[in-house]
Every structure is written in C-alpha cells, then in structure tokens.
Image (cartoon, rainbow, N blue to C red):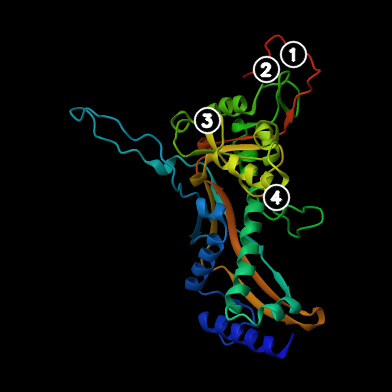
C-alpha cells in the first residue's frame, strides 16, 4: 500500500470507528443499530431487485413471518342482529417462519485496487460501495439457489452459495410442495413444444397460476421470475434480425416489456436454470436481525490486501405460500416424439 493510500485508508478506519462509537475498527466490534440500518439501506439500494422486495430488520432471531404486503379478502357483511362483526385477521394467512442464520460476508480488497482509488475524493464511498454491492449480489444468489445451512460452507462444491442458507425456492420445495411443478408426463421434467406437456411457456404459466390461492390469482402485482435461457425460443424471432451490437439491447428491451401467461416478466439475477416462479415481489423477504451485525477490518500485509470481516444473522422468507408457485425442470420437447391422445396443453 502506498503512503498516500495509507493516509486515506487510515482516515476511513477512523470514520468507521467514530460512527460506531468504538476506539478502533481494527478490533472486532458490534455495529451500532443506526449504522446497521444505514448499511442495510445501502445494500438494498445497490440492487434494483432488492429494491423491489422486502428487506427488513427483526428483533428476534426466530419467529413467525410478518406477512408484509400480503392480504386476503376482507370484504363481507354480518347481520349484527344475531352475530357480531368479526374482523379478518390477515396475520393468520402466512404459514412461514424464520430463523436468522449467521452469515459471513468477508471481503478482501488488494492494495493495488486501494492504490488506484486513493486519488479520488470519494475514496471512502467507493470502498463502502464495493463491499455493500458484493453483499447485495450474494443475498440474491442465496435467495434463489440456497438449499441448506452448512456449518462449513464449500464454495467449490457450491458455487451458487447453495449451502449458505435456505432460499425462497427451497422454502417452497420443503414447505409447500403442492405449489411446485417439477414433472409432467415423463418423471423429472416438464416439456414444452408440439409434442410436450405444454405447447408454449405461456400455457405452462397460465396453468401454474391455478396453484395460487384463488384470491391471489388475479392480483395486479403478480410477476413471473424466469430463467432467461427459457425465453430464447419465444423471443428469438424478435431479436435475431438485430445486428450483433444491438442484440443485447434488443433482448433487454423485449424482456422488459414481455409477459408470460399474461403476467409481466422479471429478469431476476441468478435465477435457477430451467425454472419459473410466479409470485408478487412483495411476497419475497430477507429478514436481518437488528443488533447482530459484527465487523472487523484487518490489514493483511502478508497477502498485500485489507480484509473486511462482516457477519449478519439473516433469513429468507415467503410471506404467504398461497401467493406463489414454482415450476422447475423445464425442457424443450423432442419434436420427433409421438403426441399422446390428449396432446400438449396450449
């Protein structure tokens, strides 16, 4: 680390210590609640997807889901001559619970990168942004791919952070399997095409909406989270005429305005391959425990880097299982396969 970099980095350490009312950020400390709140807000704001779901602090490490943004029908009428009016308790709709698991977000930043940033007046903001953005992307990846909570995670065996926490999709597999479609006429896959289980992705999504509770099926905020590769055949004709340097822009524009089964598509980062989820984004939550974030910033000259050790207790929550459905193992049908007597669903 250059001398001028050392000066601005030391100023950063002093600022972190000042904000958390501690003597030194180079010793492990408990992040103060107000700074934790600001850090969580920064993590959320760094991702367009996280802005659209619930990211909320909870006091207890374990408890029942809060039911944010989830409502059932409440309209009705009571003959008060014989019965009292009984308000609908919407808090009873949620069936999920949460358990915030300790998650380490440890970031290493090489001296060379710090040296490159040191000349900028916004050095502290750049360093903080790099750390918060990494945490935001990891949270999204865990939410869609997490299947277990390992005592010792293995990044090589689980490159999509599958063993860090139990994510939203796994919650459906474990707790609401009746709302998961994973097989069609052939075990272990759902086929799309003239000879498949469904002729089109639209037909599949339209049918899967019936897995939602009746009062949620026509909600105006229902969206479809989908693996982009599944959209290839559907939108290929719309973009293949564009020149190479226009393809990505054309694809992004088409997806942004497209629908499946009559519902808007959300192009979610790190969504599972060959999968679709139908829900409202307000049904997806990340809970973090207030007062449980720990931090330790350490200079590691033996590695020519600084390390920012952070940990947070958090959980991935489905607010109402009736407001969602998961479809996975989607494949293109073999065009040479015979069509059964019922034929593929449109």
Label 4 – label 3 distance at C-alpha: 34 Å
Q: Residue at x 78, y 13 (%)?
A: 338
Mark number, residue 344: 2
**Labels 4 and 3 touching (C-beta < 8 A):** no
> Is 202 placed above or below 60 here?
above
- For label 1, the crowd category at 10 Å Cα-Cα, with few meaning under 14, some 14 to 19 and many 20 or more, is few
| Left/right of residue 121 with respect to residue 159 in the rendered view | left
From this view, report whether residue 177 is shown above or below residue 119: above
Q: Residue 177 or 300: which is nearer the viewer?
A: 300
Q: Position of residue 27 (x, y in %)?
A: 64, 82
At which x and y percent is residue 99?
58, 54
- Residue at left offset 69%, top offset 21%: 197
- Viewer-closest of 235 and 340: 235
Residue ID for mark 3: 262
Disc nearest the viewer among 2 and 3 = 3
Q: Earlier in the sequence, mark 4 or mark 1?
A: 4
Residue that badge 4 annotates: 148
Q: Residues within 10 Å of mark 2 (few under 14, many from 20)?
A: some
Query: What residue appears at the point 53 percent right and 65 percent down from the top-left corner?
Result: 42
Closer to the eye: label 4 or 3:
3
Which quadrant is home to the C terminus? Answer: top right
Q: Position of 273 compared to 122: left or right?
A: right
Q: Which mark is residue 339?
A: 1
């Amino acid at each position: 680390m250059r001398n001028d970099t050392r000066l601005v980095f030391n100023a950063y350490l002093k600022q972190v210590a000042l904000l958390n009312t501690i003597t030194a950020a180079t010793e492990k400390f408990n992040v103060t609640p107000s700074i934790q709140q600001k850090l969580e807000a920064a993590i959320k704001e760094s991702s367009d997807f996280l802005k659209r779901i619930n990211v909320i602090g909870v006091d207890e490490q374990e408890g029942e889901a809060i039911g944010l943004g989830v409502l059932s029908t409440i309209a009705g009428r009571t003959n008060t001559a014989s019965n009292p009016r009984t308000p609908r308790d919407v808090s009873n709709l949620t069936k999920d619970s949460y358990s915030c698991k300790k998650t380490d977000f440890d970031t290493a930043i090489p001296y060379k990168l710090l040296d490159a940033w040191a000349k900028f007046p916004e050095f502290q903001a750049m360093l903080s942004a790099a750390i918060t953005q990494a945490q935001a992307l990891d949270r999204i990846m865990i939410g869609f791919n997490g299947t277990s909570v390992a005592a010792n995670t293995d990044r090589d065996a689980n490159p999509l952070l599958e063993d860090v926490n139990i994510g939203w999709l796994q919650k459906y597999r474990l707790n609401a399997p009746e709302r998961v479609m994973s097989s069609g006429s052939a075990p272990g896959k759902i086929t799309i095409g003239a000879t498949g289980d469904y002729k089109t992705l639209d037909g599949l999504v339209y049918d899967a909406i019936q897995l939602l509770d009746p009062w949620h099926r026509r909600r105006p905020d229902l969206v479809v989270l989908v693996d982009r590769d599944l959209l290839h055949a559907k939108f290929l004709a719309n973009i293949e005429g564009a020149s190479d340097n226009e393809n990505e822009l054309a694809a992004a524009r088409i997806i942004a305005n497209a629908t499946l089964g009559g519902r808007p598509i959300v192009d979610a980062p790190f969504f599972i391959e060959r999968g679709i989820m139908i829900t409202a984004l307000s049904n997806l939550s990340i809970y973090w425990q207030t007062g449980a974030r720990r931090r330790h910033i350490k200079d590691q000259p033996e590695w020519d880097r600084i390390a920012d050790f952070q940990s947070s207790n958090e959980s991935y929550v489905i607010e109402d299982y009736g407001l969602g459905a998961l479809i996975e193992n989607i494949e293109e049908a073999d065009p040479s396969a015979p069509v059964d007597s019922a034929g593929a669903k449109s």
